[in-house]
Image: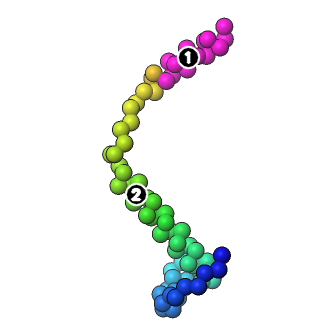
Amino acid sequence: MRTTLDLDPKLLDDLVKVTGEKSKSKAVHKALEEYVRRKRTAELIAMAGCAKFVDNLKELEELELKESKKAQW
């Protein structure tokens, strides 16, 4: 998709160098992907401890055994 942007030329040149990409478009794309990844990671970290999980693995295993025995008969 083509988009017109007004970017600082020095910053764009630095971005190309830092990313190691050969084109400005690829460098911007890489930077955008990284920015989104970091934001999503920060959101997940912020949610740490907000969800309550119940360890019911033993109960699930017992239920699966019961279900498999019913299916055999």
Q: Is residue 52 above or below residue 60?
A: below
**Front: mark 2 or 1:** 2
Magenta-drawn segment: 60-73
Q: Residues within 10 Å of mark 2 (few under 14, many from 20)?
A: few
Residue at the (60%, 81%) spot, across then down: 3
User: Residue 49 versus residue 6: which sits nearer the camera?
Assistant: 6
The N terminus lies in which quarter of the figure? bottom right
* Secondary structure of residue under mark 2: helix
Q: Is residue 6 above or below residue 64?
A: below
**Residue projecting furthest to the bottom:** 9
Judge whether residue 68 is colored magenta: yes
Which residue corresponds to the image point at 45% horizontal and 21% vertical from the top-left? Answer: 59
Question: Which kind of residue does numbered mark 1 sit on?
Answer: Leu
> Which colour assignment does the render follow?
rainbow
Residue 59 seen in the current view: yes
Q: Which residue is mark 2?
A: 43
- Residue 13: x %, y % from top left: 53, 88
Q: Does residue 18 lie above or below 62 as drawn?
A: below
Q: Earlier in the sequence, mark 2 or mark 1?
A: 2
What residue appears at the point 57 percent right and 78 percent down from the top-left corner? Answer: 27
Measured as percent of width and height from the top left, residue 25 is found at 61, 80
Residue 17 visible to an observer of this rendering: no
The secondary element bearing badge 1 is classed as helix
Is 19 above or below relative to 46?
below
- Tell me where residue 26 appears, x and y as whole percent: 61, 77
Q: Residue at x 45, y 64 (%)?
A: 38
From the image, tell me which residue sits under label 1: 65
Circle 2: residue type: Glu
Main secondary-structure element of the magenta-colored stretch: helix
How packed mark 1 is, by other alpha carbons closer than 10 Å (few <14, some 14-19, many 20 or more), is few
Q: Which mark is residue 27?
A: none
Q: CA distance from mark 2 to mark 1?
A: 38 Å
